[in-house]
């Protein structure tokens, strides 16, 4: 009997529990294996005894398919010792893998998490298969990652709610969405939600062009406008907008407040901004993420059965494939500024703020 482990690493998103369920059902029902869910990513492998739970049909019911977040917990922080100091825990992680007597490990994560897991697996000669998850959808070699489509759905729903408020109060409404380096969420939600302006990091913009678009709508008799912006978009100075939390840590965010002030200054329009934030990560996964998670989970287990390791499960040309982990994390999938979605948006007269004045 084989024993396999599964863990979630990095930021949470919708669809992670559906992957855990698919892995468990395929491994236990098809192959008769034991599955262990490891708590809080690699941190669970460091603890003694190893912090893991045996997964079976009683723990992975249909309810898990619908549940947001991850029942195993996750972390995107470096490990801290009880004394609060940072330390290299590679040796402890490898030891934890062997203490559980695992034959293979399935890691669900983005590019950063997969890079860390692969480095550990290479050093300890561990059998690793990974599954891509990121709401940013910027991993290469896969058309979609777990969590992206639910995040877009949430952002689109936000635009649906902002539009009547904008029209009722004669306002410009700005929706700031996540996207650490890529504008996939902003672009897809902007098209689906009927935005008038979409600002993404891949296409440089001018505030004068944004203002011109909004003024043209006023001239046409429209009393409102919708703007979607990715958190990674720079200010006119070329600097990223940042928010500093109570602990003094800086992170992307706040570009919508800057844009609101500039739009009001240039157009005279009353402007309000909404930062969607972590709302995009939570909630029930929509059907596309549930299906993709199920496909990925089953294929990951099948790879283990075939003895194929150091591979990432991926979605290409409407089917599941697998690629070397190293190739997947080395590449990066930004928005194609000349791609079909940008072309479609322009065809709908959506402005990217790059029009010639």
Image (cartoon, helix red, strand yellow):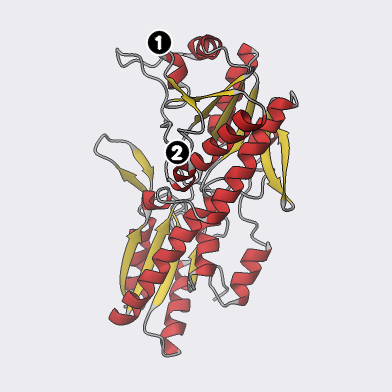
Secondary structure of the residue carrying numbered label 2: loop
Q: How far apart are marks 2 and 1 (CA)?
A: 24 Å
Residue at position x 55%, y 34% in the image: 108
Secondary structure of the residue carrying numbered label 1: loop
Quarter residue 86 falls in: top left
Q: Where is residue 285 in the image (x, y as percent from the top left)?
A: 48, 51
Left or right of residue 225: residue 171: left
Visible in this render: residue 344? Answer: yes
Visible in this render: residue 139? Answer: no
Of the two numbered discs 2 and 1 on the same chain, state the one appearing first in sequence.
2
Residue at which label 1 appears? 48
- Figure disc tally: 2
Residue at position x 47%, y 17% in the image: 45
Q: Residue 11 carries which label?
A: 2
Q: Position of residue 2 (x, y in %)?
A: 63, 18
Q: Quadrant of the N terminus?
A: top right
Residue at position x 68%, y 62% in the image: 338
Q: Nearer the viewer, residue 243 or 100?
A: 100
Q: Residue 141 carries which label?
A: none
Q: In this rendering, is residue 215 above or below 125?
A: below
Q: Which of 3 and 109 is in front in this view?
A: 3
Q: In this rendering, is residue 312 above or below 334?
A: above
């Amino acid at each position: 009997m084989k024993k396999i482990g599964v863990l979630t690493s990095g930021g949470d998103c919708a669809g992670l529990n559906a992957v855990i369920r698919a892995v468990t059902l395929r491994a236990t029902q098809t192959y008769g294996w034991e599955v262990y869910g490891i708590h809080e990513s690699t941190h669970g492998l460091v603890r003694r005894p190893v912090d893991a739970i045996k997964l079976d049909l009683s723990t992975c019911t249909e309810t898990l398919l619908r549940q947001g977040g991850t029942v195993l917990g996750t972390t995107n922080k470096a490990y801290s010792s009880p004394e609060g100091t940072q330390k290299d825990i590679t040796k402890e992680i490898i030891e934890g893998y062997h203490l559980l007597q695992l034959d293979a490990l399935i890691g669900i994560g983005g590019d950063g998490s997969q890079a860390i897991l692969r480095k550990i697996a290479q050093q300890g000669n561990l059998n690793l298969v990974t599954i891509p998850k990121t709401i940013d959808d910027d991993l290469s070699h896969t058309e979609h990652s777990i969590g992206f489509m639910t995040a877009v759905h949430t952002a689109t729903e936000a635009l649906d709610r902002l539009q009547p408020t904008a029209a009722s109060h004669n306002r410009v409404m700005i929706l700031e969405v996540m996207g650490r380096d890529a504008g996939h969420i902003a672009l897809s939600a902007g098209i689906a939600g009927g935005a008038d302006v979409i600002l993404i990091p891949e296409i440089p913009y001018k505030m004068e062009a944004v203002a011109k678009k909004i003024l043209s709508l006023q001239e046409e008799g429209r009393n409102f406008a919708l703007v979607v912006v990715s958190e990674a978009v720079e200010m006119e100075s070329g600097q990223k907008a940042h928010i500093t939390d109570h602990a003094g840590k800086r992170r992307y965010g706040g570009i919508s407040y800057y844009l609101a002030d500039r739009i009001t200054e240039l157009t005279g329009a009353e402007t309000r901004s909404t930062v969607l934030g972590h709302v995009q990560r939570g909630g029930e996964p929509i059907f596309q993420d549930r299906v993709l998670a199920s496909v990925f989970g089953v294929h990951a287990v099948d790879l283990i059965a075939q003895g194929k390791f150091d591979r990432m499960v991926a979605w290409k040309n409407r089917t599941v494939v697998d690629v070397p982990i190293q190739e997947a994390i080395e590449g990066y999938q930004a928005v194609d500024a000349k791609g079909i979605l940008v072309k479609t948006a322009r065809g709908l007269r959506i402005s990217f703020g790059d029009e010639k004045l």
